[in-house]
C-alpha cells in the first residue's frame, strides 16, 4: 500500500511541476496495492537511491510477476494473473485484463473512462 501511495504522490508532483508525459496510471496504483514481492521490491529498488535492496531483489527476482485483472467480476482468485499473459486496452494502455472475455465484459464500464493516449 505504501508503494502505491508513494507512486501516486511521485506522479502528482511531476504533474504539478509540469514535467512532460507525467501521468498517473490507475493500473500501476492498483498493481502496487496488490503487488507481489518481486514487483514491490523492484519498484522500491528503483526509487530508493541506495544499494540496500540489491540482495533482496536477487532473492525475489525469480518470483513470477503478477497483475490484477480490471474486470471486477473476474473469476480468477483475487483477479491475479501472470503479468506477461495480460492483455491491455489498446486505446488507453492503462486497463489490463486476464483474457479477452474479461476485457469484453468490462468494456461497458471501461469505455466511460477510456481515453486515447
Image (spheres, helix red, strand yellow):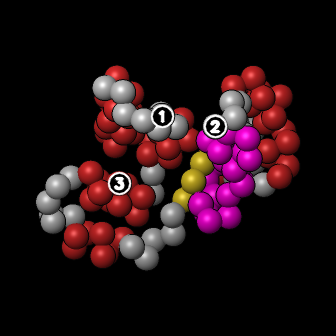
Task: State the residue in front, 11 or 44.
Answer: 11
Residue 106's x, y, as percent?
A: 78, 36
Report the magenta residues as a range.
79-98
Q: Which mark is residue 23?
A: 1
Q: Considering only vertical position in the picture, is 17 above or below 94?
A: above
Residue behind mark 3: 43
Give percent across and percent down for residue 66: 54, 59
Q: Residue at x 72, y 45 (%)?
A: 89
* Contact? badges 1 and 2 (CB < 8 Å): yes
Q: Mark 1 to mark 2: distance in Å? A: 10 Å
Query: Which quadrant of the structure image shows residue 111?
Result: top right
Which callout, 3 or 1, points at the residue further toward the start of the chain? 1
Residue identified by numbered label 2: 117
SS state under label 1: loop
Q: Is residue 60 above or below residue 34?
A: below
Can you give x and y, in whole percent of width and height, for residue 113 in the image?
69, 25
Q: Quadrant of the C terminus?
A: top right
Amino acid at each position: 500500500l505504501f508503494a502505491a501511495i508513494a507512486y501516486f504522490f511521485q506522479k502528482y508532483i511531476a504533474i504539478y511541476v509540469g514535467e512532460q508525459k507525467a501521468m498517473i496510471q490507475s493500473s500501476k496504483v492498483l498493481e502496487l496495492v496488490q503487488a507481489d514481492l518481486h514487483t514491490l521490491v523492484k519498484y522500491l529498488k528503483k526509487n530508493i537511491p541506495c544499494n540496500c535492496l540489491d540482495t533482496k531483489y536477487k532473492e525475489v527476482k525469480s518470483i513470477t510477476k503478477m497483475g490484477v485483472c480490471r474486470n471486477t467480476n473476474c473469476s480468477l482468485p483475487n483477479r491475479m494473473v501472470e503479468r506477461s499473459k495480460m492483455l491491455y486496452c489498446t486505446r488507453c494502455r492503462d486497463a489490463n485484463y486476464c483474457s479477452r472475455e474479461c476485457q469484453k465484459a468490462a468494456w461497458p464500464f471501461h469505455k466511460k473512462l477510456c481515453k486515447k493516449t
